Image: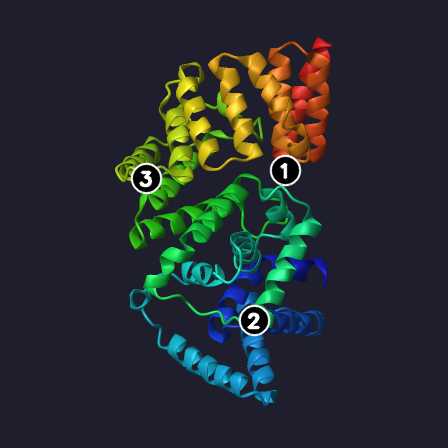
Amino acid sequence: MNESLARIFRAESGQLLSSLMYVCQDLQMAEDALQDAFVQASIQWPKEGSPENKGAWLHTVAKRKLIDKLRQSNSQKNQHKLQLIEQNFSIQSQQVAESDYDVPDERLRLIFTCCHPALNAEAQVALTLRTLCGINVKEIARAYLTSEVAMGQRITRAKKKIKDAGIAYSVPTKDQLANRLPSVLKVIYLIYNESYNAYESQTLTKAELAQEAIRLSLLMVELLPNSEVLGLAALLLFHDSRRGSRQSAQESYIPLEKQNRKLWDDAIIQRADHYLCAALDYQQPGPYQIQAAISSLHANAQNWHATDWRQIHLLYSSLYRLTPSAIVALNCAVSLAYYGDINKAYKNITELEDTLKHYQPYYAAKAELEVRLEQYTLAKNSLNDAIKLSKNNSERDFLLRRLNTLKHIL
């Protein structure tokens, strides 16, 4: 596949696969049909020229490939699928209203569909991010603090389980949605996270990824409002209210401490506060609510020095009790450093190194504390480690500037 076609594949494959899988309810069959369509494009386009609407061309060819595969099969099951596909294409041409579905959005329906309870929660999320959201294996592996090879193997095993068990992908009914809710919220959360750290090859731009995640989270508020759904919506809005201050014409990345708070979107912050208050009214604490409460303290502080670090540390401690992880422990330690006990915080951070040795923010945070402790040589080493692990050019440039500042001190 040439570079141009590879870019088109990254941009179009998620949406095309979603559509194909929706009509045939078979992930492997949909993937095979789409792959055949791209093979045909790689042969035909160089000779005849590429079509104006490349996505529509690929979708049409993939549908034909799918139908051909089913027609060539003697399987009664596949003949039934063929009937369903032909009926579905007929229904699509009649433009069925979204309000006729229990889940009134195609992408959200497909996320619920892919988060199949026959798979474990991590496999549900990873497979959904890969197949429907255009997020590659490297990016998913980073979210789970594992290697690209290990994550690829997990996704392959999930696909094999689907095939061996004959799991049919069908949209869950309304009474089945709650069972899949945690995985669906995790997918939306990780889509937004990726908007903060998008690779150069990312299917969508950072802003598009963020807005899609927010759109899905607000749809969830309408569909299944509960404490964690509201908490997630609040969390994403708090983060997004600061988007305009995270970079400038002079700096490609500006950390929270240095951001111009006048650029924060007050209307979005107020909306996020509204959702957070609604979530807290349930009196059912959960991870997304706690993270939203932390973001609210940042968003509503008049300046960096006015931040209520004591309350933030207490919230991170609560989050750790609910969802103990090395990343939460890292954030808990950082908040403790700002709260006042920097020596204890640094000790806690160093104890996490074996677990987080491949996690770039760990070394960036460690370097920050080492600078404050005037351990400049250690800080230089930590910054070098962070730079080596950086996959995002903006963050790498920021860390390089920090390293150059240190070199003047040493």
SS of the residue under disc 3: loop
Nearest the eye: 249 or 264: 264
SS of the residue under disc 2: helix
- Quarter occupied by the N terminus: bottom right
Residue 179 to residue 274: above or below: below
Residue 62 to residue 106: above or below: below
Which is more N-terminal, label 3 or label 1? 3
Q: Which residue is mark 1?
A: 392
Which is more N-terminal, label 2 or label 3? 2
Q: In front: mark 1 or mark 3?
A: 3
Amino acid type, callout 1: Asn
Percent position (x, y) of residue 325? 54, 35
Percent position (x, y) of residue 262? 39, 24
Amino acid type, callout 3: Gln
Q: Which residue is mark 3?
A: 284
Nearest the eye: 226 or 381: 226
- 10 Å crowding of disc 1: few (<14), some (14-19), many (20+): some
- Quarter occupied by the C terminus: top right
Asked if the residues shown at circle 1 and circle 3 are in contact, with their CB atoms under 8 angstroms apart, the answer is no
Nearest the eye: 387 or 79: 79
Percent position (x, y) of residue 26? 54, 72
Asked if the residues shown at circle 1 and circle 2 are in contact, with their CB atoms under 8 angstroms apart, the answer is no
Residue 138 to residue 397: above or below: below
Q: Can residue 247 be seen in the rendering of this structure?
A: no
Q: Which residue is mark 2?
A: 165
Image point (62%, 41%), residue name: 145
- 10 Å crowding of disc 2: few (<14), some (14-19), many (20+): few
- 10 Å crowding of disc 3: few (<14), some (14-19), many (20+): few
Amino acid type, callout 2: Ala
Disc 1 to disc 2, C-alpha distance: 39 Å
